[in-house]
């Protein structure tokens, strides 16, 4: 006989299933709520975004300094790609460049100097919102002026200059963060309003002279208006709902921009790896072997010849490159494997810089890879840099430090991220 306690009534079974389903739905809603609260309540990856900012601004700055003697031949009036040819091309593809506003040498020198200055100031994180816009203008203006002067590294800088405008990349390791810790707000002082006021003077000229397309004009006008609104809210209502709303919007844009950067890096490696698999030159190893014998790609002929003489090394490097690039996007959900492949890719780009003489391409790719660096490592790296600076100067660490804001909650953008 079956005991009454072991019997389950037909009505009790659906009730138990319904309770379990309700609990799962409630847990899912709670998880989604926590995720939305985190995405809207904070700018994720502050150290990663700071490293990306420092890496790409450093790469572009070093490139401009190295090519300073050849600047007019590369992007200026003395280049083989004349101003008239550039005007015809830009008239067809509608690319953005302020160098098409005038064909004078003086205007080119001004734009080149602005590109240098914006890269240097973005590197140290001074008035980062304005500098990120100027950095984007400098990159697009020079690269779109002479489209045949770039390589893969220039393409990556081109894309990342667009994405950096969306990110709040100065929360740590910047002069803005240091100012916020000292005064309670990164927007204090007259430099910010004066700078944005000067930038706003270019909008009427661009509109009436038809020097910029309607799409780009709308983008720059939106950035200018939003920055003015941010300054007014921060000045007259720093603790009100308006500031909280702007913080939520800025956090959403930052997190979306950071996600796009990560997706872009994965797309670059995935497409490069799968195209290598389809090509016969990467299957037989000649894609690596032939460049090692070209004078243009051999800054160290002896080292290149030694490597090319070993068929085993050529095979290992060839197949290792393909495996790492194809596998990397699939390892993002496994932290340990991802970190190993990330180190392998950075070493690979360092080898390309030394063996093939492509330092700026390698720096750009390493800066892009840095978005996946672990927060623990970046915090440790910042602490080591701080300790070295203190040991060398005997004083405070400068903008490399992670400052504690003097007015917590007032300047969320530049508040230091909590240690993991």
Image: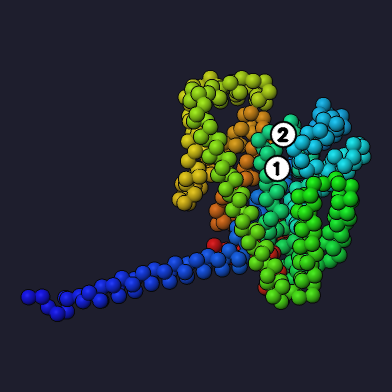
Q: Quadrant of residue 46?
A: bottom right
**Residue 241 appears at what percent x and percent y?**
69, 75
Q: Residue 347 sits in which quadrant? A: top right
Residue 176 coordinates in the image, percent (x, y)? 75, 61
Mark 1 → mark 2, Cα distance in angstroms: 10 Å
Q: Quadrant of the N terminus?
A: bottom left
* Residue at x-position 75% and y-position 48%: 136
Q: Is residue 396 left or right of residue 16?
A: right
Q: Which residue is mark 2?
A: 150
Circle 2 crowding by C-alpha within 10 Å: few under 14, some 14–19, many from 20: few
Q: Position of residue 267 (x, y in %)?
A: 56, 42
Q: Split into 4 quadrants, where in the image is the C terminus? A: bottom right
Residue 342, given in percent of the width and then of the height, sits at 53, 44
Q: Are marks 1 and 2 in contact (CB under 8 Å)?
A: yes
Instruction: Please tell me whether mark 2 sits on a helix, a strand or a loop.
Output: loop
Could you tell me which residue is drawn at 84 percent across and 66 percent down? Answer: 189
- Secondary structure found at label 1: helix
Q: Which of the pair 399/204 is nearer the observer?
A: 204
Residue at image mark 1: 158
In this orientation, which residue lies closer to the viewer: 40 or 386?
Answer: 40
Q: Is residue 66 above or below residue 35?
A: above
- Is residue 289 at all visible to an observer of this figure? yes
Residue ranking furthest to the left: 1
Q: Is residue 369 visible?
A: no
* Residue at the (61%, 68%) spot, across then down: 41
Colouring style: rainbow
């Amino acid at each position: 006989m079956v005991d009454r306690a072991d019997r389950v009534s037909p009505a009790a079974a659906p009730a138990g299933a319904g309770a379990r389903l309700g609990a799962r739905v409630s847990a899912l809603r709670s998880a989604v709520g926590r995720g939305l609260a985190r995405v809207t309540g904070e700018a994720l990856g502050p150290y990663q975004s700071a490293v990306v900012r420092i890496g790409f601004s450093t790469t572009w700055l070093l490139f401009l300094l190295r090519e300073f003697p050849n600047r007019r031949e590369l992007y200026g009036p003395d280049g083989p790609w004349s101003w008239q040819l550039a005007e015809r091309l830009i008239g067809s593809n509608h690319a953005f460049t302020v160098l098409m506003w005038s064909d004078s040498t003086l205007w080119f020198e001004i734009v080149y100097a602005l590109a240098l200055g914006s890269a240097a100031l973005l590197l140290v994180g001074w008035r980062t919102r304005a500098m990120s816009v100027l950095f984007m203008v400098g990159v697009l203006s020079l690269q779109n002026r002479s489209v045949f002067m770039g390589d893969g590294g220039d393409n990556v800088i081109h894309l990342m200059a667009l994405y950096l405008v969306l990110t709040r990349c100065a929360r740590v390791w910047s002069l803005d963060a240091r100012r916020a810790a000292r005064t309670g707000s990164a927007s204090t002082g007259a430099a910010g309003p004066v700078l944005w006021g000067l930038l706003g003077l270019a909008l009427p000229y661009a509109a009436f002279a038809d020097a910029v397309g309607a799409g780009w004009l709308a983008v720059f006008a939106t950035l200018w208006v939003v920055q003015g609104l941010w300054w007014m809210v921060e000045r007259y209502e720093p603790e009100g709902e308006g500031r909280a709303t702007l913080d939520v919007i800025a956090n959403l844009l930052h997190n979306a921009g950071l996600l796009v950067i990560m997706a872009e890096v994965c797309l670059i490696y995935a497409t490069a790896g799968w195209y290598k698999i389809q090509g016969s030159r990467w299957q037989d190893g000649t894609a690596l072997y032939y460049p090692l014998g070209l004078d243009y790609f051999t800054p160290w002929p002896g080292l290149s010849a030694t490597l090319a003489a070993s068929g085993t090394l050529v095979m290992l490097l060839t197949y290792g490159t393909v495996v790492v690039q194809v596998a990397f996007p699939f390892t993002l959900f496994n932290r340990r494997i991802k970190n190993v492949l990330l180190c392998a890719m950075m070493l690979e780009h360092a080898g390309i810089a030394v063996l093939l003489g492509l330092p700026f391409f390698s720096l750009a790719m390493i800066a892009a890879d840095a978005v996946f660096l672990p927060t623990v490592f970046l915090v440790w790296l910042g602490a080591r840099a701080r300790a070295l600076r203190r040991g060398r100067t005997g004083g405070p660490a400068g903008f490399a430090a992670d400052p504690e804001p003097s007015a917590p909650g007032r300047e969320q953008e530049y508040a230091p991220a909590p240690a993991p």
